Image (spheres, grey):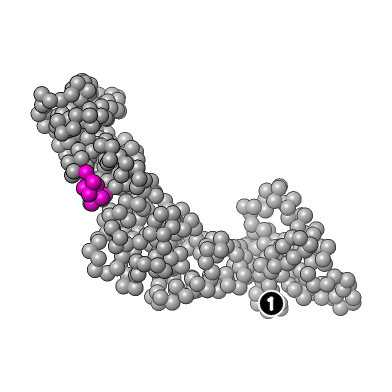
Amino acid sequence: MHPVLRALVERDGGVVTRRVVVQVVPAWVLTHAHRVGQLRRVLPGVYVDAALIIPTTSTVSVAPASSASTSSASGSAASGSATAGSFASGSSTSGSLAAVDLCTSAAARAASAADSAGVAGHTAVSAAASRCASVTFGRAAPGAVAGVGAVGPDGDEAFRLLDVTRRHRAALAWADGRAALGSVTALAVWGVRGQPDGEPVRLDVRAGCGLRSRSHLVVHRRDDLSLAPPGVLIRRGLTVVRLERALVDAWPLLPPQDRPAPVIKAVNDRLTTPERIASALTAVPRLTGRAGLSTLLDRLAGGCRSPLEIWGHDHVFTGAGMPVFRRQARIVVGRRTIYLDVYAERERVDFELDGATTHGDPREREIDLRRDALLATVGILVVRFARHRLLHEPDAVRREVHAILTSRRAGMSVGRDTAFPPP
């Protein structure tokens, strides 16, 4: 690859645009790199290093080309062409993968010769690449470059085969300052949700910008979008909408069972607050599932920090006979700060809701025991309920909570537990 073009590609993480390239090198340099398979066009005017695209067996193809040759071809290009040509005649299914490898190797040797030979080498490369015969697994790749001997997919198919981060970079490069990553795509950049490989990249744009949705890329038009801070921010080198707006916009796009997790994680990681998300929600009055998001924000504002705690709030620790509990109450014992899941302050009882993921580990169990013993030194009784009981026996758990609180009140009325001041 031309050294200046290579420097541009490496500088931008394997992604480069035609607009940037033609400012520093002639356009034929980019055309040549694309023709010989060093770069792949993934979106209009956007190219990536071909090494970043790993085609599946159903997307590898070598398109046929004219058999024209030139007397100015270098020895390296000629030898590469001969090698590829030896496989072009009558390759079997079992030898197809080897043919693809050799065609790729031939193109690489020809490209190296071209870098040394300049324009003449460029002509030689085209001739060498044209001798790679068609080698296809299953079907030709959609958008494959015809007539140039390129190996691998181009266009939308190449975009799909990029890793998530480079799809984000390529989409923003295509938008050229007219968009920001939004909704579920922005959540991946903010680190509160992973983006599955098959999920399209989503861009937020201003109405009338001229960008249109494509395969594997969805354009969302917003009249209220500002492409300057604080409307958008730069995170991990990518332009993204604010986290609060991304959480709101992503809510109706996710399956109902997956909606709470990113919101809970964002709050638990202290990236935002329930109040800030609620403020962003006011800007989208017709959001699908709005009531569910509002309820979740109310629970988070009340101190719930996990789906299990929200379940406990709704089905166990509210209703007739229940006191006003403090959730995630902060208690300092000596040099240690402890947060209590559901704390009955008057009765000095901490109800812990133990999920199956962490509290089943023996090491976590030991940590819990030490914590409970420390709280006992200041007169706080710890009662633990497992996830299975909370979900499947909520009425029984409610009765036990009532009985425990009643017992503690009775003990306090006859003078027990008075030796312990409030922590």
Q: Residue at x 28, y 58 (%)?
A: 176
Q: Residue at x 75, y 73 (%)?
A: 345
The image position of residue 282, as x and y in percent, is: 43, 77
Q: Residues within 10 Å of mark 1 (few under 14, many from 20)?
A: some
Q: Assess whether residue 18 is covered by the magenta stretch.
A: yes
In the depicted structure, whether residue 109 falls above or below residue 139: above
Q: Assess whether residue 358 is covered by the magenta stretch.
A: no
Kindly identify the amino acid type of the residue bearing the numbered disc 1: Val
Q: Tell me where residue 74 sits by quadrant.
A: top left
Image quarter where the N terminus lies is top left
Left or right side of 363 for 237: left
Q: Residue at x 82, y 75 (%)?
A: 409
Image quarter where the C terminus lies is bottom right
Q: Secondary structure at mark 1?
A: loop
Q: Is residue 273 visible?
A: yes
In the depicted structure, whether residue 310 falls above or below residue 415: above
The image position of residue 235, as x and y in percent, is: 44, 57
Q: Which residues are magenta?
A: 17-25
Q: Which residue is mark 1?
A: 324
Q: Tell me where residue 145 sits by quadrant.
A: top left
Left or right side of 103 for 317: right
| Camera-nearest residue between 21 and 387 | 21
Q: Is residue 135 visible?
A: no
Q: Tell me where residue 228 sits by quadrant.
A: bottom left
